[in-house]
Image (spheres, rainbow, N blue to C red):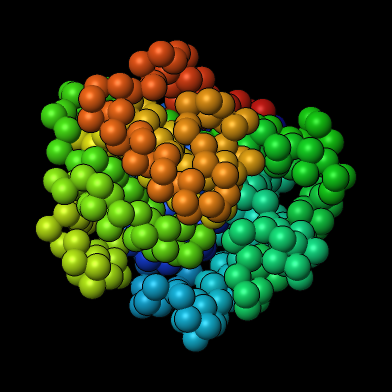
């Protein structure tokens, strides 16, 4: 055996993760997903080395994930709510710098590393495709709108300006088309309908593995049942895609119907939403939790009767899974991504019929206040088992072991 071969076999197995997309302290569904993927690799005996910015380094510390980090920016930026075109431009430039810095540090990646791109965005996919590692994994978390959907606004998450959606389409087309030329590759995906989508780009069945999102069943089960303090709960990013306007329109209607109505908004959204709630005269009816631990999040969910999901577009719906794991019913718009995952465990409303939405929310709250929970007649335990993070982690471990041994 040569000296190089001996050195290779004596090295600890290492998963290198390229995660240039985390830019703030507010967690999204993809960030939660990555925490479980990272722990799955650690549990399988791999060490973690990550490429990402200062916000990502803070994320690792907050999530308690042991990893070494190659920093790809000079500091954490402040991009506001990323709602304005100016803020989006600043964020795009920041992504470009992070990608450029990653390319200059690719020598830190070894041939025997297994490299995982947390997204199909160009700022993660370009370093993945150009690095010298033999084994490469890319994750598809959401399907971009087609060019036709962008031009005609044929999908609910396409804004009138169309620029963000056009950028998303172009980025995904670029990554999915070029990654085909990597020799030893696996494409993991988070939703059942994505398999057919990837095959249209020319990927083979043996190159595609379902590594779904999951429900944090263990964390939910650790939290005991709670007395109901809130009629509804919501958590998510403050973004038009999340149906914020419908959420805010729901609250005053429910206050009129139920004078003692209370809602809890979980997560880092107070700075943006509290002034709007104040304008609506609802400050006494809405509680903002701020950033909370996983246990506290599930305590708040279990202290709520109903979870609202007014999103205009989702790739899976992690927060729906969390609510169901806590035994909390969900009302959501009937997006096509939900039924293949959650079946009839969600009460669906025709997109985006606000009148029907308000009617179903009111009806469900009325039922729940009298002790009628539609989940009681369903096999929730089976859903929790099928969609637990343990199942997701086992799927990812099988991918890494297959690629790297």
Q: Position of residue 36 (x, y in %)?
A: 43, 37
Where's the C terminus, which quadrant?
top right
How many marks overall? 0
Which residue occupies the foreground of this view, 159 or 222? 159
Q: Is residue 181 left or right of residue 388?
A: right
Which residue occupies the foreground of this view, 188 or 70? 188
Which residue occupies the foreground of this view, 54 or 135? 54
Q: Position of residue 68 (x, y in %)?
A: 40, 52
Q: Position of residue 330 (x, y in %)?
A: 40, 35
Q: Is residue 347 left or right of residue 4?
A: left
Q: Is residue 109 left or right of residue 68?
A: right
Quarter of the view holding residue 167: bottom right
- Up-down relation of residue 287 to residue 379 (above or below): below
Q: Residue at x 29, y 66 (%)?
A: 273
* One can see residue 35 in this view: no
Q: Residue at x 39, y 22 (%)?
A: 374
Q: Residue at x 53, y 25 (%)?
A: 344
Q: Position of residue 384 (x, y in %)?
A: 43, 21
Q: Residue at x 13, y 29 (%)?
A: 227
């Amino acid at each position: 055996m040569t000296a190089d071969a001996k050195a290779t076999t004596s090295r600890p197995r290492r998963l290198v993760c390229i995660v240039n997309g985390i830019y703030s302290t507010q967690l999204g569904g993809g960030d939660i997903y990555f925490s479980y993927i990272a722990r799955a690799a650690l549990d399988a005996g791999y060490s973690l080395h990550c490429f990402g910015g200062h916000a990502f380094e803070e994320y690792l510390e907050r999530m308690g994930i042991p990893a070494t980090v190659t920093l790809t920016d000079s500091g954490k930026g402040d991009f506001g709510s990323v709602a304005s075109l100016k803020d989006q431009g600043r964020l795009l430039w920041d992504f470009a710098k992070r990608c450029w810095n990653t390319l200059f540090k690719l020598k830190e990646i070894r041939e025997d590393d297994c490299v995982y791109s947390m997204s199909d965005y160009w700022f993660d996919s370009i370093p993945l495709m150009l690095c010298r590692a033999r084994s490469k994994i890319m994750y598809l978390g959401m399907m971009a709108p087609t060019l036709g959907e962008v031009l005609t606004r044929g999908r609910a998450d396409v804004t009138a300006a169309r620029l963000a959606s056009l950028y998303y389409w172009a980025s995904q087309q670029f990554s999915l088309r070029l990654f085909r030329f990597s020799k030893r590759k696996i494409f993991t995906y988070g939703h059942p309908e994505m398999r057919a989508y990837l095959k249209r780009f020319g990927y083979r069945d043996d190159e595609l593995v379902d590594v779904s999102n999951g429900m944090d069943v263990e964390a939910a089960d650790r939290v005991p049942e709670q007395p109901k303090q809130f009629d509804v709960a919501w958590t998510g990013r403050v973004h038009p895609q999340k149906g914020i306007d419908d959420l805010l329109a729901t609250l005053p209607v429910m206050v009129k119907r139920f004078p003692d109505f209370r809602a809890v908004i979980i997560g880092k959204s107070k700075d943006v939403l509290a002034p709007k709630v104040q304008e609506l005269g609802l400050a006494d009816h809405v509680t903002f939790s701020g950033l909370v631990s996983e246990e506290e999040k599930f305590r708040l969910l279990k202290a709520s009767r109903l979870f609202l999901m007014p999103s205009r577009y989702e790739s899976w719906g992690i927060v729906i899974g969390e609510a169901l794991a806590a035994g909390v019913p969900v009302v959501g718009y009937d997006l096509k991504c939900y039924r293949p995952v959650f079946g009839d465990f969600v009460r669906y409303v025709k997109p985006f019929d606000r009148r029907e939405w308000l009617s179903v929310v009111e009806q469900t709250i009325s039922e729940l206040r009298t002790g009628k929970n539609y989940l009681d007649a369903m096999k929730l335990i089976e859903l929790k088992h099928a969609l637990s993070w343990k199942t997701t982690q086992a799927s990812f471990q099988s991918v890494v072991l297959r690629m790297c041994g």
